[in-house]
Image: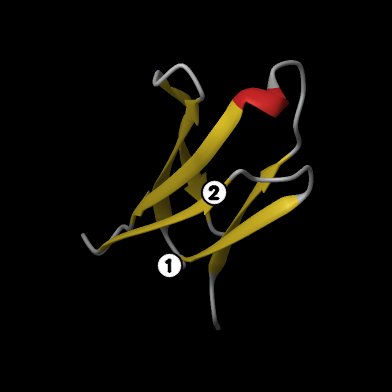
Amino acid sequence: TDPWVSVLFAGGSGQSYVTEMNTTIIRFDGKIETKSASYPAVNTNIFLNGTTRTDRVIVDVSYTDGNTYTVKDELVGFQ
């Protein structure tokens, strides 16, 4: 088993102002991994190494005005 978590940038209003998408996974075993995409286009996909248990995934998006917002923070179970 090679568990992973996929984070997809789907766009939306204001997408042209996004400068960075940061994704962090806090795995069940305590390991933390962060990956990012600069100026993500629609359908940009980031893959993170997960576990066969429940992991926490946090997605932060930064905008051209310098503000950063957490757009997703959820527990993701193995499927």
Task: Give whichever of 62, 25 is nearer the camera.
Answer: 62
Query: Residue placed farthest to the bottom in the image?
Result: 1
* 66 versus 33 height, above or below: above
Q: Which residue is mark 1?
A: 51
Q: Residue at x 70, y 26 (%)?
A: 15
Quarter-of-image position of residue 19: top right
State yes or no: discs 1 and 2 in contact (Cβ < 8 Å): no
Residue at figure coordinates x 78%, y 48% from the top left: 43
Q: Amino acid at mark 2?
A: Ser
Answer above or below: position of 65 versus 60.
above
Does residue 76 show up?
yes
Tag shown at residue 38:
2
| For marks 1 and 2 on the same chain, the one whose residue lies earlier in the sequence | 2
Identity, as a three-letter code, of the amino acid under mark 1: Thr
Q: Residue at x 51, y 24 (%)?
A: 63
Q: Secondary structure at mark 2?
A: strand
Residue 72 seen by the camera: no
